[in-house]
Image (spheres, rainbow, N blue to C red):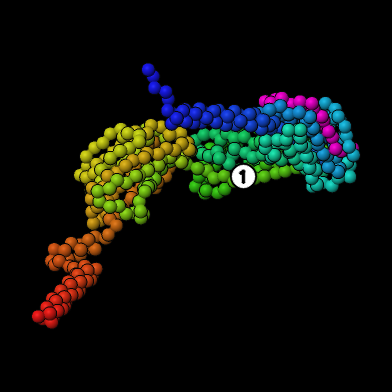
Amino acid sequence: MLNPPSRKSNLAAISIAAGIALVFFIFAVGHSASAATAQPDLAVALFGTGSDPRPITAPGQSVGLAIGLDNLNGAADAHHVTLSAVLPNGLNFQGSEPAPTRVEGRNRLFWEIDTLPAKASPRIFQVTAQTETNLAAGSRLEISAEAESSEGNVDATHHHAKYTIYVQPAGPDLVFLGSTLDSVPLTADGPASFQVNLTNAGNLPATDTHLEVTLPKGVNFDKADPQPESSKDQVVTFKLGDLARGESKSVSMNLHLDPLQLSDLSQSDRPLAFAFRLSRMASGAEVTDSHFQITKHVESAGQDVAVWLTMEGAKEPGEVSPDSDVACVVQFANLGNAPAQKVVVTVNLGPGLALAHSEPQPSATAASDLFPGGVVRWNVGDLDVGMAGSIRSTVHVSSVPEEGALLNATITADGIDIDTTNNTATLIWHSPLGADTLKAMHQASGNAKVESVPARRGHSFLRLILFAIVVGVVLWISLRARRSGAGG
């Protein structure tokens, strides 16, 4: 016959069941609460449109704008959405696609949307406006737009945007964007190829534009793309035609040094000035919009490999302790104007040093009487102009000589190096305590045993404690003897 469950067993079962029910209740409430708090995340963006989307205009010009509205990051649908845009004074509304639901005060636009689903892609609202003719050049026009829904928004920073348009004087404006001639070497053994980049930064088309390049004496024109209109007396002229507002163009040129003047150019090291001028036709007259000048020197042709040594993780610069590991970085580069071929980096380790680890692994190692720690070599290969690299190594320091631990790095390449002063780098590490200090400490420890002040103070304190104990024992014995005598 089965024994009926005890009262304690019933209470335990009831408690367990109640706990499980409570967990499910909390989960259900939390789930429903998270579902209830899911919100849309309306995002608004403002940007320029048209063939020239730059934020510029002139008095009396039309302006194209686009307003983007999305719910891409929203976790719920957005209902009763209202998108509004405000145009500033000086910018008058002309039309939009789609048309606004209503317009208040001429320049406040509203679009009403019943539902914008969660994860909805952007909708674009195209707006056209016109600037007033009395706007002052240099003034700014700030447009704002925002969206609202009946559910609110998860992130309050997403649902509004601003866009600023800058008012310029009406007209074209030819400007240089730069030239690669700045970074191109001018050498005796080959042509110099470079580009000149320009644009019409104004708000009206530029008519019949020209680029004029004046070359220094001793530099001859070779060829160009597009072909120049003329080339005479060191002046090369290009006819670029009409440039729309915001339109850019590039001109490529090849030059070479005059062989008859090469010796004088190389020896005198005189600066060579290249002048550039941009012009256009306006009302039958030539107008120069901008000009600039680049100064160059004739350079020797060749590679220029260089190497640097740095130490990482030291407590003090230039100091290492015996029986420690030091992180070193060897950096190398080709600073010349021609590729470097068959580049080799070598690290020489003095006495007390040894290579423990390296990334990348060395190509070869060798013993050396001059460098007892060994000679380590990396075959880097070829380095193009401006190319650089590094080698990270761990050097184990077993001892530090009195004169210091020497680490030396060199770099070599085939051919002529136009600057050999940067082919070697050296580090000398010393012990944290100087050699004289170490000698003095060694002699003192060998001749006499010196007791430190703290030790002497400790011994005196112990003596005082022992003396107090002895005095206490003597007094206690004397007292006991007196009491015994009195009792007898």
Q: Amino acid at mark 1?
A: Ile
Residue 89 position within the rendered picture, expressed as x and y whole percent measured from the top left: 86, 43
> Does the image show residue 454?
yes
Residue 124 higher or lower than 282, as above or below: above
Residue 78 located within the stretch drawn in magenta:
no
- State the residue position of label 1: 294
- Quadrant assignment for the N terminus: top left
Q: Residue visible at 83% across and 39% down?
A: 87
Q: Position of residue 398 (x, y in %)?
A: 23, 47
| Image location of residue 244, percent across then percent down | 77, 32
- Residue nearer the viewer, 329 or 247: 329
Q: Quadrant of residue 205?
A: top right
> Is residue 446 toward the left or the right of residue 356 in the image?
left
Judging depth in this view, the residue of 19 and 453 nearest the camera is 19
Residue at image x 51%, y 39%?
Answer: 187
Horizontal arrangement in the rendering, residue 117 relative to residue 262 (left or right): right
When asked about the image quadrant of residue 318, the answer is: bottom left
Q: Nearer the viewer, residue 47 or 347?
A: 47
Q: Residue at x 31, y 34 (%)?
A: 362
Measured as percent of width and height from the top left, residue 170 is found at 83, 41
Q: Is residue 24 left or right of residue 3?
A: right
- Please tell me whether the stretch drawn in magenta is mainly helix, strand or loop: strand
Packing grade of label 1 (10 A; few <14, some 14-19, many >=20) is few
- The region drawn magenta spans 106-127
Residue 227 can be seen in this image: no
For residue 282, which quarter of the picture? top right
Q: Is residue 442 above or below residue 225?
A: below
* Residue positioned 35% across, 36% down in the render: 359
